[in-house]
Image (cartoon, helix red, strand yellow):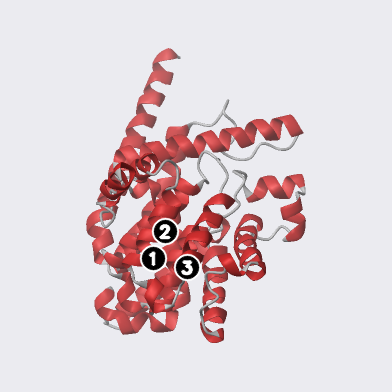
Amino acid sequence: AEETERMLRALAGVDEWGWDVFALKEASGGRELQVLGWHVLRLWRLDAAFALPHSVMRAWLAFVAETYTDSDYHCQTHAADVLQTMHWVLRSAGAASFLSELEVFALLLGAMVHDAGHDGRTNGFHKELLSGRALAFNDQSIQENFHVWTVFRRMAGDAETNLLGSLSRAQFVELRRLLVVTILATDMTKHFGLTKDVRALVEARAAAGGPSGPAAAEGWHDATDQIMCYLLHACDISSQAKPHALALAWTDRCFAEFFRQGDREKELGLPVSAQCDRETTVISSTQVGFITFVVKPTYDLLGAILPRVAEVCVPEVNANLAYWRKCDEARLAAAAAAA
């Protein structure tokens, strides 16, 4: 009862942008993805909408959590964080207003499984190593293909964890398609193309004089796939759009994982990947670049579709960018003084 009380307290702010996933990790004894997954699926009443047996939901959530390794960044805590971020985008920012119930279900499941089986290594690492994953997926979005395959392979062979077993044939086919499309779009090499496509949609809407945002729900129906891909991608890279303490915690985890990869690349005699060499990588300038060229444009554009994002998230992006700029300027000043 005491543990339940602690978990309920940790879940209390789940509708807030600044919700702390690390508090739920602690309160749940490291079962944050299962606890949050159960909570969110019930909040959206998806168990009732799709006749999901609770025993299967429990088994499926346990299976998905087990696929995650104890990587510093790409672990179940990240999956839970992306799930809560998606919940906020759908509910608090209103994105659900232009999506069907099946599409909301796909995005929440996608958030949970989008890194299933991640081993804390990049696609580039697998490609250079010519790993089993690289061979299986012909060097194409290696990890993203592996994440989708991991989940569907299990569900196909095990009725007890087949969360989608109660769906109609047509629902299953469409849900599988949506999960494949949106999770493959989380490959960072797809970022600039995806952003360009969504910017064209937003500009076309503005040029036609139509309103944007949830009020213009009907207008996005012809581009739902791109919008859904963009929502999952934006949630996946949301750490530097979060309140400062969370942004810092995720930065530490991200570079810890990168540097472990760099150490391993040196051991194996492979080329050391960008940002993975602990001797030469400057975290502050790397973060300035990442926020300036990736995170900020993503959230500025998302704010044009969802005004709440412009109000709540964009100021956090700007504050984190200002912090990293200040760190970098201090570093450069110190280097100049030492010279």
| Residue depicted at 43% across the width and 75% down the height | 103
Q: Which residue is mark 1?
A: 41
Q: Residue furthest front?
A: 1
Where residue 73 sits in the image (x, y, percent)? 50, 42
Q: Amino acid at mark 3?
A: Cys
The span from disc 3 to disc 2 (Cα, nearest Å) is 20 Å
Count of numbered circles in the view? 3
N-terminal of the pair, mark 3 or mark 2, is 2
Could you tell whether 269 is left or right of 304 in the image?
Answer: right
Which element type, helix, strand or loop, lies under badge 2?
A: helix
Relative to 223, say whether 306 is above or below.
above
Disc 3 to disc 1: CB gap under 8 Å: no
Q: Which residue is mark 2?
A: 37
Disc 3 to disc 2: CB gap under 8 Å: no
Where residue 298 sits in the image (x, y, percent)? 39, 58
Which element type, helix, strand or loop, lies under badge 3?
A: helix
- Observer able to see residue 297: no
Q: Which residue is mark 3?
A: 229
* Picture quadrant of residue 329: top left
Relative to 298, say whether 246 is above or below.
above
Q: Which mark is residue 251?
A: none
Could you tell whether 36 is left or right of 70 in the image?
Answer: left
